[in-house]
Amino acid sequence: MVQFPNTTSASGVWNMTDVYNNRLGGTWPSLPAIGFFGGGETPVTNVIQYLNITSSGNSIDFGDLTQARSTGNAAVASTTRGIFQGGGAPTSSNVIDFITIASAGDATDFGDLTVARRTGVGSGNNSTRGVAAGGGGPSTNVIDFITMASVGNSTDFGDLTATKYRLGSTSNSTRALFFGGSIPGAQNAGVIYITIATTGDALTFGDLTQAARQTSGVASTTRACRIGGFSDSGGPQNFNTIDFVTIATTGNFTDFGDLTLGRGYLAGINNSVKGLAAGGRDPAAVNVIDFITIASTGNASDFGDLLSAIYGLAGSSNANAGVQ
């Protein structure tokens, strides 16, 4: 049966003249900025949920991961695929699975990481390549990469500057930044980076405004923001801190503002304008989603709610700064 063109999704059968005219005229359909979250804990879950980053509101059920996992499940995305790497299930997992962002449904097996890991795996991507860095269970300094449009096992990229877990991370199309986390025996404020398109070991970037673990991050094409985190130095503390840096430089982060609620084990997603901070615990799990305008400074505002109170989830979007 002939499928007539759908001007919302670009599906159906198009003649080449209409394709050309729509692309030339800027009217070719495109997906909205879809953010997604997968896995998490209370209890450990396989649920994937999604939302439209450009408009406030609650998340919606998308489907399921190939296995339930949390605390270290690291997400990356291209414009068409979302990919989840590793995590605790409850022991360390090497599983990589993916979703097709345009169509809700369950995840499909992609391949395996070079090393099974959980507990705060850092991640980042450009438009073609995704990386997974560090993590615990046991602690590692390994950085892997995948080509997101294909399927298969990850490949060694290089090493972090030290064995680290409980990392925060974010990226633009050039650099991935990994920040805070734990070096066995102590949490730290250090920030390191890699150039995604190459391979090699991470380099020193600077420091966060405070030592923190299980933070998260969001980014525009030029600016990276660290969001939240916690410390158990001198007694447990959940941070509401947001700080930022210019990605193309090196140096220390600067205060941006505050989350609506201090928490660690949260997930960060973004498009080129807006950054979202979802879930986490303070110390109980929460369903809160906050947002900030990345190019400005100031406190976060309420965006909506996750499907349930959850922490240790992973998130990304088809409009993240790495694909801009």
Image: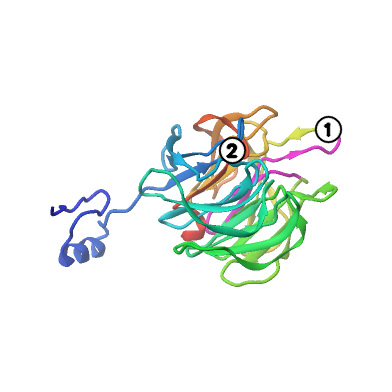
Query: SS at mark 1?
Result: loop
Query: Which residue lies at the image location 18% right of the left edge and 58% below the top edge?
Result: 13
Q: Earlier in the sequence, mark 2 or mark 1?
A: 2
Density class for disc 1 (Cα within 10 Å; few <14, some 14-19, many ≥20) is few
Query: Which residue lies at the image location 16% right of the left edge and 66% below the top edge?
Result: 17
Q: CA distance from mark 2 to mark 1?
A: 24 Å
Which residue type does callout 2 highlight?
A: Gly
Residue 283: x %, y % from top left? 70, 29
Mark 2 vs mark 1: in front: 2
> Which residue is more in the foreground, 221 or 139?
139
The part of the image, by quadrant, that contains residue 170 is bottom right
Q: Is residue 247 visible?
A: no
Q: Which mark is residue 235?
A: 1
Query: SS at mark 2?
Result: loop
> Which residue is more in the foreground, 151 or 295?
151
User: Over which residues does the magenta segment extend?
Assistant: 212-234
Density class for disc 2 (Cα within 10 Å; few <14, some 14-19, many ≥20) is many
| Label 2 sits on residue | 40
